[in-house]
Image (cartoon, helix red, strand yellow):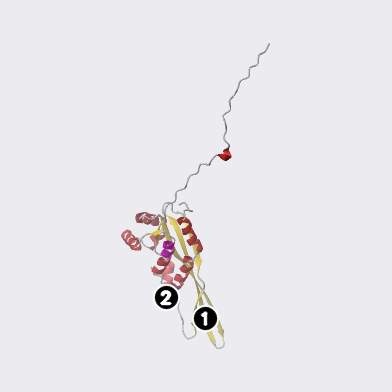
Amino acid sequence: MCLFFQRKISIPEVKNVSQSKPITTTPKYRELTIVVLPVYIPASLQQQYELDGPYRKVITLVEEVVINAGIKTIDRQHLDQVIQELQLHQTALINKQSKIKLGKLLGANTLLQTSIDDIRIKNSHFKGYGTEVKTKEVTIVVSLSLVSVETGDKLFSTRRKSEPEQLMISEYGEMELNSDFTDELIEKTFLLIAANDGLRQFLKNHNRGKLRL
């Protein structure tokens, strides 16, 4: 004769996962502190077109965009003083390690670098009606980038080309490409960048806590 015994097994209650609240962590966002570096001009362009800077209007223009977005900037006099103390030249300011070192000394976590990348000239001429007219069509390419001091990575970058500007050269005399002409065109091109929605949106997004750096 076989005897069967029933053993009661207690099963722990399992909560409905869909009803449980997920564990979330709120990411921490660093407050941006930006140092606006001097405009970088390649040596080849400096010599060929007599570009000597320092393009204070360009720096002021870019700083206004940053400040209007509610972002802190490093005082320009303090920047100039540190650059002189470290004896940093144009070539050093484009060097990644030098820029990161400069940013750390200034207490900034982000670098804003502007540069004049290229100047393009297209020559053409018209001959007729008893006269000859030559033109030089000048286009300037500039760029702007935001770089993390901690990692050296680019956080934002944009590049713009100016509208072509013409220099008229007639048979009675020539108008050469001079520094006044190029300076004005450089400022106009950086105005396009300052009005760039991408840059403004990047700064606004960080100010609203949408970007984690």
Does the magenta-highlighted stretch encompass residue 104?
no
Q: Which residue is mark 1?
A: 134
Instruction: Compare residues 180 and 196 and report the one nearer the observer.
Output: 196
Residue 126 is situated, as x and y percent measured from the top left of the image, at: 55, 82
Q: Is residue 187 above or below residue 206?
A: below
From mark 1 to mark 2, how far is it between C-alphas? Answer: 20 Å
Instruction: Give the mark nearest the N terminus, 1 or 2.
Output: 1
Label drawn at residue 109: none
Does the magenta-highlighted stretch encompass residue 66?
yes
The residue drawn where x is 43% and y is 62% is: 66
Q: Secondary structure at mark 2?
A: helix
Left or right: residue 79 versus residue 8 is: left
**Label 2 packing within 10 angstroms: few (<14), some (14-19), many (20+):** few
Residue 21 is situated, as x and y percent measured from the top left of the image, at: 53, 41
Q: Is residue 43 above or below residue 17?
A: below
The residue drawn where x is 58% and y is 40% is: 18
Residues shaded magenta: 62-68
Q: Which residue is mark 2?
A: 180
